[in-house]
Amino acid sequence: MARKVGIFGAGWVGLVTGVCFAELGHDVVIRDVVPEKVEVLRRGEVPFHEEDVPELLERNRDRLTFTLDPQDVAGCEFLFVCVDTPPTYSGDADLSRVWTVVDELPELSGNPIVVMKSTVPVGTGEKVRHGLDARGLAHVGYVSNPEFLAEGHAVRDFMHPDRIVIGAFDPADADEVASLYESLEAQIVRCDVNSAEMIKLAANAFLMTRISFINEIANVCEATGADVVKVAEGIGLDHRLGPHFLRAGIGYGGSCFPKDSLALKQLASNSGYHFQLLSAVIEVNELQKRRVIGKLKRHLGSLRGKRVALLGLAFKPNTDDMREAPSIVLASRLLAEGAEVRAWDPVADGSVLPRGVEIAPSVARAVEEADAAVIVTEWPELATLARPEIRDAMANPLIVDGRNLLDPARARAQGFLYEGIGRPVSPTDVLAETPERDPELEA
Ligand SMILES: NC(=O)c1ccc[n+]([C@@H]2O[C@H](COP(=O)([O-])OP(=O)(O)OC[C@H]3O[C@@H](n4cnc5c(N)ncnc54)[C@H](O)[C@@H]3O)[C@@H](O)[C@H]2O)c1
């Protein structure tokens, strides 16, 4: 049955939710506060890079309305909150946009349900419930329905979810929200609101733990001569462990993991508990991004005046999202070391990188006369980086593969010096000249 769905926020979560619900046959009104975004959407364009969203938007235009006016959601049966919840200075989630939505809700007749899709700390639902009651909206239901989509294949994740989590104060509200998804084949986990909020935070924390775990294993592999790619394969085939999130690299970034890990750590410490494991996961990730600098120095000595190409800037492939992308940290560190940085990405806007970084229009231009090329994001376009014309264009054919995208043997056979993450270093990968001594390396 077609239902009327209102959505606050036309970002990754709000827009994907909106076009997918429209595809499922529901009538959707999406409200945002940024006029340019609403204008673009009304023209039928998508303000960010996400597979399948343009097609779904086009196909379902008659079931989708975009607006700046919160009054336009007045007739909706469901009011999804999909606004951003960035970290505050202390690491707590900033819920100010969530509260603005509660304040801006129009007069609502019938028994609509506010559905929280934004990632929020445990206890938020109870506070919003009180807030709604205080606004005279006791007849409005409240459900926590956290979102697990991953950018890059968000539509696929929405349409084929591993599970749908529905936490409610009133089982009837949970039934209503579940009915919205009835045409999807998915297991529904019903629970209380606090548990639904914790499921989202804990799932993200566990994924990050796996990433930091395999990165630490990679670092030990480097010290001992093992190959983390084989190690991960061997671990991942164990049915108790599974293969996912065991890819060593230069650490996680993005709009969710960094902020959600901080929010959970803060949530625990605000409740009097020191979440030691999560603190270590966060610290390992920070250090991991910086290990690339050590690898470059090992080959080049001091980086002052050296030209480094950063290849791939978005926090992961198939998105243009630069939020908390490791490329930002790397670019800053390289500039601080005195290196010249040229950066390339097929879709992401590199203008958020620190001043002084040159944005290159192509891989070929980025690597021209470069002393090293660093693969930061595993865009498919970079899978063929180790080819003769790239080698010949570089001043020094060094590739530091931050995502283990390339085959080391093949890259070396093409005449490159190659270093991955957690992979054995070839004895031939030593520069003929002894690099300048760098006191920082010896500290
Ligand atoms: N991006 C992801 O991969 C992802 C995945 C799962 C969960 N989440 C969570 O979902 C939430 C949204 O994330 P996102 O990536 O879509 O954020 P986003 O920043 O891309 O989008 C948020 C949108 O909300 C709009 N907004 C702000 N205040 C508003 C208001 N009062 N009314 C209407 N719109 C308003 C903003 O203008 C923006 O367009 C966050 O809590 C995030 O942690 C994100």
Image (cartoon, rainbow, N blue to C red):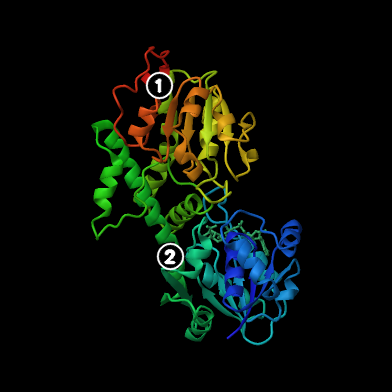
Nearer to the camera, 274 or 293: 293
Classify 375 as above or below 174: above
Could you say whether the residue bearing mark 1 is in a helix, strand or loop?
Answer: helix
Would you identify the image quadrant in which residue 50 lies?
bottom right
Q: Secondary structure at mark 2?
A: helix
> Which numbered disc covers residue 299?
1
* Some atom of ligand 1 lies within 8 Å of the CB belonging to the residue at label 1: no
Q: Amino acid at mark 2?
A: Met
Residue 264 percent across, percent down from the top left: 45, 56
Look at the picture and state if 50 lies above or below 409.
Answer: below
**Camera-side mark, 2 or 1:** 1
The C terminus is located in which quarter? top left
User: In terms of sequence position, does the residue under pointer 2 or pointer 1 come before the other?
Assistant: 2
From the top left corner, tell me how far across and down residue 169 is, in percent.
49, 80
Between residues 77 and 52, which one lies in front from this camera angle? 52
Q: Can you give x and y, in whole percent of width and height, for residue 283 in the image?
A: 40, 42
Q: Is residue 367 visible?
A: yes
Q: Residues within 10 Å of mark 1 (few under 14, many from 20)?
A: many
Count of all numbered marks drawn on residues in the image: 2
The residue that mark 2 highlights is: 198
Using the image as rendered, state which of residue 142 and residue 371 is in the foreground: 371
Q: Position of residue 107 (x, y in %)?
A: 72, 80
Is ligand 1 within 8 Å of the beta carbon of the residue shown at mark 2? Answer: no
Disc 2 from disc 1: Cα separation: 45 Å
Task: Tell me if mark 2 has few (under 14), some (14-19) or many (20+) residues whose alpha carbon lies within 10 angstroms of its own.
Answer: some
**Amino acid type, callout 1:** His
Quadrant observed for ligand 1 in the rendered image: bottom right
Q: Is residue 175 above or below residue 240?
A: below
Q: Is residue 283 left or right of residue 140?
A: left
Q: Residue at x 47, y 75 (%)?
A: 166
Q: Is residue 276 left or right of residue 307?
A: left
Q: Residue at x 24, y 60 (%)?
A: 239
